[in-house]
Image (tube, grey):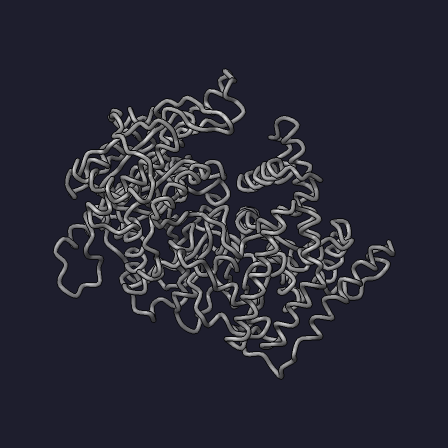
Amino acid sequence: MAPVPPRMHAPAEAALRASAALPPGSTLPQGLNARQREAVLYLDGPCLVLAGAGSGKTRVITQKMAYLLRECGYQARHVVALTFTNKAAREMNERVRTLVDPRLLRGLTVGTFHSLGLRFLREEYAGAGLKRGFSILDATDAQGIVQELLATTDRARLRAVQQTISLWKNALLDPDGAARVAQGPDEAEAVRVYRSYEATLRAYQSVDFDDLIRLPARMLAADEALRARWQARVQYLLVDEYQDTNACQYQLVRMLCGDRAMFTAVGDDDQAIYAWRGATVENLAQLARDYPSLRLIKLEQNYRSVQTILEAANRVIGHNPKTFDKTLWSDLGAGEPIVVTPMDSDLAEAESIAMRLSAARFERQAQWKDFAVLYRGNHQARVMEQALRTLRIPYTVSGGQSFFDKAEIRDVLAWLRLIANEDEDPAFIRAATTPRRGIGQGTLQALGAEAARRGVSLYAVAADVSEAVLPAPRQREAVRDFVRLVDHFQARAARRGGAVPLLPGAAVQGDLLAFDPDPPAFDADPPAFDADAVPAAGAAGGGVGGAGLVPLPQAAQTGASDGLAGAATGVDGLRGDDAARVLDDLLAAMNYERHLYDTLDERQAQSRWANVLELLEWLKRKADEDDMTLLELVQHVALVTMLERADDEEPDAVKLSTLHASKGLEYPHVYLIGVEEGLLPHRGGDDEGDVSEAAVAARARRIEEERRLMYVGITRAQRTLRISWCRKRRRGREDVICEPSRFIAEMGLQAEAPRPVGDTDPDRTLDRLKALLKKR
């Protein structure tokens, strides 16, 4: 049983009354409305905060952390706050730092489910059947294994099987459990692949992102002593975006909280939009069943949007069945009416919106970044981009692929990572198989099994591979050739007497900058609180990060400090010109250009090769300008990101975004396009013509989620909302007749006739803008 905090609190109602007239200088929460304050002060048991869009949930979570640490005697190392994105974790870290004395923050954990799961596995690796230096495969590496097992180049089928396996893992189903629920030949094949995939991961002594949560949840459920130990460490748990949790994450929450049930979950059933990746809104209702004493607190005052927008949002979401009733309201005024405009085509829609947006910027004396265009699917962005470019309107597209996430860039970086750290198994796997050099899954599984038996890396086994491990001479020779190539480039590194220490036990591991897999105990005090080093990881389905872990492609989102960019212990490297020469020679030895032209059409190969050359030029320039070693170059990649991702360098540009990617964001002026039947709500699934009871129920659930997605889109708007739909839309080579979405009528709105706006020739833009402004 965890110790009781030395300072006991009054019941929430008494605390609310007492805090109504707090004296100046009090450390109790201030600047909160009554319901927010109630959520912060309530500590009499499990608590669910139903936080509507724009209702200040992050303030509640950070104020509650501060209250626990300052007023209730909780030690920071026993308080854990979990969220889903790097951005949210970083924002919480920054806010808590302004509220609490840094001395009280020592050991505080603010991060993601994945980062907490990684910390767990780093301590409990033996119980999971892993070696201390287990590897973490990212989605791309995992996809490579699945593709090899499927023996297919059908990308759609590959993605479908990989998603099915992920959903099974998130539902806590092992291959045997998946076999019991599988339906049809496609899922039967997925079960077969799942079994082989799990066997491959075990042979590689690796885990994937789903395992970072699944394995801890399973181990805690099965081991009472282990469960008691971790429950003593996590004395108060806060969970953000609770509606986005899946069955596996809910199991982890229950196992960590135990019978004490000292937790606060914050969520909104009306914003549950991730069922397609395993999240279940049912977890909100399940809380009340599993914890009968659950305190429900509703945050309904919205601080983002004008009342007209909120009333439309309330009306549309009111058509969904409700687990908890909630009505958003605002004291920001009524605001302008919502405008709904039918368009003749998607081209006309894009041109008209570009023109109206440009006019609105002049009329309102606004910035470009005050405007957002939201849509259901990525494919809708193309025609919108063309219209904005025609009018020379700057824009950014959310969810765009990072340069460092491109397959060809990751292929080259895998070689660099392996040269810098030969014990990095994911880099070994990628480098050994791309380009192909006679090392396949069978060879890798044999090497992995021997590595697991000896407790060493794949490279260590490959370096002295024996006939007992690989009986076939051809396999052994292919492995030896690969090892000789890696050794050659390691030997060309200009050795230095000693490397500058990074952090104790730091090393590059896969696509992650990872610390010693045998860290200090969870209870141990770190040397000092550093909000930039607190765990922060990617969303479900996204990256991983946290205590001792920084994802390479998106490290800027973790708030990692520049102190991470030093050289790792025990690894020497190259400098300046040496690095440039080795990079050129390495690329030639890889024969990567020929690999691209052999496996892709000419246009794709040219594009990818140009990206590789751009990477090499950038690496050479950094090595020369900053006098970096090879390892420092690899680590620098972990800390770079596209400029538009940096919060403090947000460009002045219109934001184009899918509705899913817009969640959690807000814009003064929003254009919601393509609000048509079949698009929003999206028509999907293989059961459209099925009239069985199960199929009808499944379609109803999809419509409910699409309605929640519409609700999310509406509540992104702060001041104005413009909705458009097309009478016909180009799909493939034909025009398809469209109907307005049912959601428009559910909002209580009617379509209006479009205002004619001519062509978008840039030379006539100013005249048309003036004419349009005169009509207003």
Q: Nearer the viewer, residue 365 or 688?
A: 365
In the image, 749: left or right of 321?
left
User: How many numbered marks are there?
Assistant: 0
Residue that extends furthest to the front in the rendered view of this protein: 763
Residue 209: image location, x then y, percent: 55, 50
Instruction: Give percent across and percent down for residue 737.
Output: 41, 21
Residue 400: where, in percent of width, then height? 46, 49
Residue placed most toward the observer, 280 or 344: 344
Q: Is residue 6 at all visible to an observer of this figure?
A: no
Q: Depth check: 341 or 184 in front?
A: 341
Q: Quadrant of the N terminus?
A: bottom left
Query: In this picture, is 641 found above or below 16?
Result: below
Which quadrant, please, contains the C terminus? top left
**Residue at image x 53%, y 77%?**
627
* Residue at figure coordinates x 51%, y 75% from the top left: 625
- The reply to whether residue 765 is in sight is yes
> In terms of depth relative to the viewer, which is nearer, 721 or 773?
773
Residue extending farthest to the top is: 691
Q: Position of residue 303 (x, y in %)?
A: 22, 46
Indicate the quadrant where residue 153 lies: top right
Q: Left or right of 325: which side holds 674?
A: right
Residue that extends furthest to the bottom in the rendered view of this protein: 497
